[in-house]
Amino acid sequence: MEGLDPATRRDRIEAGRVVLRRAVPSDLAMIHAAMSDPGVMRYWSTPPHTDIATSRDWLEAMIAADPAISDDFIIEHDGQPIGKMGCWRLPELGYLLHPAYHGRGLASEALAALVSYTRARGLPKLKADVDPRNAPSLRLLERAGFLETARVAGTWLVAGELCDSVYLELPLNSS
């Protein structure tokens, strides 16, 4: 995104019980375990991954993404990868967490770290597109200060199901 200083890009952010770090090929097993889980992928923009090759392609794209337009991390807890948090396309936020780690506040810690980091980088705002049925995700974003900007019906067609969107934003500058 224009205006972000490349010198402010970090490869690792330590934040309480979680670490945000850049993805590496050895994250494949966790990525596939999470992205092949129907519960994790219920409100994602694609259906669950049915084979490891799909997850490998997804992870490789994350690793190879242009840092001028992408700022994405793996969430690590106790030295293990447990999810992903970041902006595949700045300023669009996306995240997922392996189901074994749901309900522990780890996503909140990762999001707080990402918000602080992107604010320090000079990003003016973060945006999110959430399926309105995804109450836990909406609560996570609302606790972090995101505000709803719009609701639109029929924005995503995922596995033959037309899904709606709640759009949210978090202004990051103080002006």
Image (tube, grey):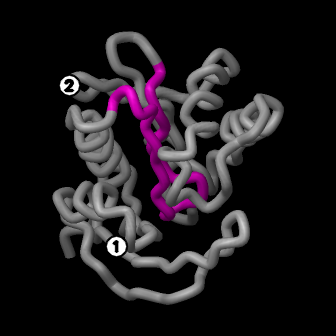
Q: Locate residue 2: give its quadrant.
A: bottom right
In-front residue for pair 87/54: 54
User: Residue at coordinates 50% horizontally, 79% vertically from top-left?
Assistant: 164
- Disc 1 residue crowd, few under 14, some 14–19, many 20+, Cα 10 Å: many
Q: Is residue 149 magenta?
A: no
Q: Say if 129 sits above or below 123 in the image.
A: below
Residue 134 in the figure: left or right of residue 30: left
The quadrant the N terminus occupies is bottom right
Cα distance between the residues tagged 1 and 2: 25 Å
In-front residue for pair 16/56: 56
User: Residue at coordinates 64% horizontally, 30% vertically from top-left?
Assistant: 32
Residue 66 in the figure: left or right of residue 151: right
Total numbered badges shown on the rendered structure: 2
Point out which mark residue 169 bears.
1
Q: Locate residue 148: give its quadrant.
A: bottom left
The quadrant the C terminus occupies is bottom left
Q: Give the amino acid type for the residue marked by disc 1 in the picture.
A: Glu
- The residue that label 2 is drawn on is 16
User: Residue at coordinates 50% horizontally, 63% vertically from top-left?
Assistant: 92
Secondary element type, mark 1: strand
Location of residue 70 in the rendering, given as x and y in whole percent from the top left corner: 60, 51
Q: Give the amino acid type for the residue marked by disc 2 in the picture.
A: Gly
Location of residue 115 in the rendering, given as x and y in whole percent from the top left corner: 30, 51
Location of residue 152 in the rendering, given as x and y in whole percent from the top left corner: 48, 88
